[in-house]
Amino acid sequence: MSYDLLMRQALKLHDEGRLEQAEQLYRQILETSPDHPVVLNLLGLIAQSKNLHDQAITFFSRAIAQNPQSAEYVFNLAWSEERCGKPAEAIKTYLRALRLQPNIKEAHNALGNLYAGTGKSQQAREQYNLAAMLDPAYAEPRANLAKMEKDIPALQNLATQYPDEALIPYYLSLLYRQKGCLKEALTAAQTACRLFADESGLLLAGELSLDLGFKASAHEYFCRALEFNPQSVTALINLANNETDEHKAEQMYQKALDIAPDNVEAHINLADLFHRQGRLHEALEEYRQAVIRAPERAEISNNLGVIQKNFGEYEEALGLFFNALTKQPEKKEYALNAAETLIRFYEKDADKARKIAANWLRQMPTNAFAEHLNAAFNREKKTETADYARELFDLFAEGYEDVMNKIEYRLPQEIAERLNQPKGSIIDLGCGTGLIGQILKNQENTLIGVDISPAMLEQAKKKGVYDTLIEENIEKYCRRLPPADWVIAADVFGYIGSPEEIIAAVFPRRFCFSVAVTSGKDDYILMPNGRYRHHPAYIKKLLQKAGYSDIMEHKTELRQENGHPVEGIIFIAKEK
């Protein structure tokens, strides 16, 4: 077949969108004319259409070598350089194209985007204005300029002037989202999708739908984005995140990683899925892959630490938790994880754990967990526990009752059995999530719940059994304690130390409370796990000193700790 006929056939296939067949013929032509600039340029355009920009750059560079005066070839090269993440090279190449042909409006607009992306606002503004001057109907540079300047009114005006331009409502949606105006952002994104449903617009509409709680709409948008681009990693991850079938979710995460092996979110979310399923070794590997790719992400170090803690690798876990804390010292969750792990490590190597705790306190002297553990490890009698208790139970609130079930916590039931349907007004000190209130509430009593943790009180409120809930340190609350028929403090003194002031303030009200007991010589002692234990004789002495004369003691097992029962006593004190 002659060269002319082969070329005509290839161009016809190209125009018809049959790019694979056209590419085959172009490559056939190159076998006899390896430096044909037109064919090289066309092969570059086909590579561009496949997002194979490295390959496209090679073709365009070869074409330019044969025809260095072609502004078209130079522009095409710059376009692929830009999409390869080479802004400096792309800027130089666009400027070269404009020297050859100054009126390429798309080159001016592209330069504006590149300058804006590198913080050169004035140069960007000049390029956008040049592009707009070359074609009054060219809306894109005007929209880009308004977006760069975060000018919502300007974009709204442009939307009126160019009602069919999808880019304008898309930019409006982005700016509304930045301002936290999610409903307006979603409306604008939906408008953009109606005008032109490309991947970026569909993904934005899906994410905004999720932000607003419209899960069904979000699913639809992500599915459409995946239809538009079956290689859309963002669509796959979002669909997997909201998939109830964990097997399907895993497949989507794996597909996302097949497409983009370095995608950190896919590694993290797949690791989270494996963690929930108890597939800890697989979760560990995915977290490791994530932390390799994003070592600056504190949450990855934390999640990896949780797995290491589950494996009993306490030192390695501590290193990861402290790494996360160094990056985000305000994250109480990371501090709690470090504290829980340090308590476990203390059981293996008390001296080393003590040194680690001391170093933590030196590094973060205001951290309540570090302060409390230092006191616990050094068996100090007195320490400020209010901040520790608040932060601990705020973090603990959501899963508190599940944990209590796992450690066989039966104190509420035992107190209920001892009090036998108490009547009148009851004050529940340290009410937590309301386990005591839930079991004691009846038609003949009123309940006041007091707790230092707002998150715990929020859980208690959901039970609907308390007549009043008060957020306050119970030691301070007891200084103005109202009249009551009963005061209850279940598993509270483990976080207080000496209960002398509270017992004195409660008298002469009937008082029911529990303590974990110590058989040592000390009146009370702060254990390495951060909880206090009390000597029964000391508690009885305080009750008698306050004025109680009818004191009953009921031995019990409060809960399990590391597979061992915690011995305790329920005290019921009355005035005869």
Image (tube, rainbow, N blue to C red):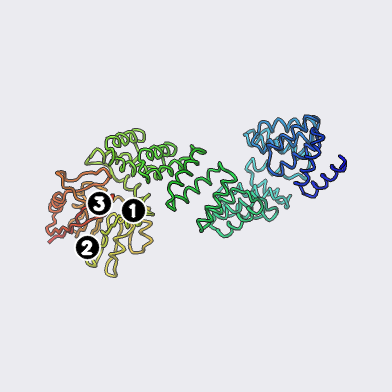
140 horizontally vs 273: left or right: right
Residue at image point 30% right, 37% down: 353
Q: The residue under label 1 is which amino acid type?
A: Glu
Which residue is nearer to you in this view: 37 or 460? 37
Q: Secondary structure at mark 2?
A: loop
Name the disc covering residue 564, or none. Answer: 3
Q: Position of residue 352 (x, y in %)?
A: 30, 35
Q: Which badge, 2 or 3, is on the more N-terminal residue?
A: 2
The single residue placed furthest to the front in the displayed view is 1
Callout 2 environment at 10 Å: few (<14), some (14 to 19), or many (20+)?
Answer: some
Report how far apart the C-alphas of labels 1 and 3 lie in the structure.
33 Å
Q: Which badge, 1 or 2, is on the more N-terminal residue?
A: 1
Report how far apart the C-alphas of labels 1 and 2 lie in the structure.
21 Å
Name the disc covering residue 37, or none. Answer: none
Name the disc covering residue 471, or none. Answer: 1
Residue at image point 44% right, 52% down: 276
Name the disc covering residue 485, or none. Answer: 2
Foreground: disc 2 or disc 3: 3
Q: The residue under label 2 is which amino acid type?
A: Asp
Say above or below: 36 vs 216: above
Which residue is nearer to you in this view: 357 or 270? 270
Q: Secondary structure at mark 1?
A: strand
Q: Secondary structure at mark 3?
A: strand
